[in-house]
Image (spheres, rainbow, N blue to C red):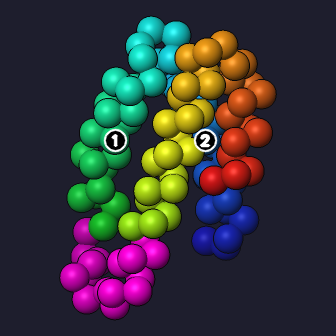
Amino acid sequence: MTWLVYSLIVVFFWGIVGVFQKLGANHSTPDSLMVWTTIGYVILLPFLFTGSHLTTLPPMAIAVGLLAGFANGLGAWFLLIALNKGATASVAVPFTVNME
């Protein structure tokens, strides 16, 4: 597949996640929604990384990955707060996707 196909898949799934983030923000707190979002992601990880050799990565790659994950997590948490405070998902999610 080309990069464009993968990019379109991302757009599709980010659209779906935006709906679930707004639904969750309407019925939960940002803190609890972040925890359950993270648990869902952790459950998915073994299926995404079958056959990969994460233990052979150089330390710099691990550090960059951890920092990227930290920044992504903080960004997601603040997006959930914005949705919980009344932001419209159709505005807040596309606006913040450009930042991730």
Residue positioned 41% across, 83% down in the render: 61
Residue positioned 47% across, 18% down in the render: 24
Looking at the image, which is closer to me, 8 or 85? Answer: 85
Amino acid type at image mark 2: Trp
22 lies above or below 77:
above
The residue labelled by disc 1 is: 38
Residue 75 horizontal/vertical position (percent): 56, 45
Q: Secondary structure at mark 1?
A: helix
Which quarter of the rendering shows the N terminus? bottom right
Instruction: Give the CA separation, mark 1 to mark 2.
Output: 15 Å
Residue 55: in magenta span: yes
Which class describes the residues within 10 Å of circle 2: few (<14), some (14-19), or many (20+)? Answer: some
Q: Quadrant of residue 90?
A: top right
Q: Is residue 21 left or right of residue 42?
A: right
Q: Is residue 39 left or right of residue 19?
A: left
Residue 32: in magenta span: no
Q: Are marks 1 and 2 in contact (CB under 8 Å)?
A: no
Amino acid type at image mark 1: Thr
Looking at the image, which is closer to me, 12 or 83? Answer: 83
Q: Secondary structure at mark 2?
A: helix
Dominant secondary structure of the residues highlighted in magenta in the image:
helix
Residue 28 seen in the current view: yes
Residue 39 horizontal/vertical position (percent): 27, 39
| Number of marks | 2
Q: Quadrant of residue 30?
A: top left
Residue 16 seen in the current view: no
Q: Is residue 54 left or right of residue 75?
A: left
Residue 80 horizontal/vertical position (percent): 54, 28
The residue labelled by disc 2 is: 14
Which class describes the residues within 10 Å of circle 1: few (<14), some (14-19), or many (20+)? Answer: few
| The residue stretch that appears in magenta | 50-65
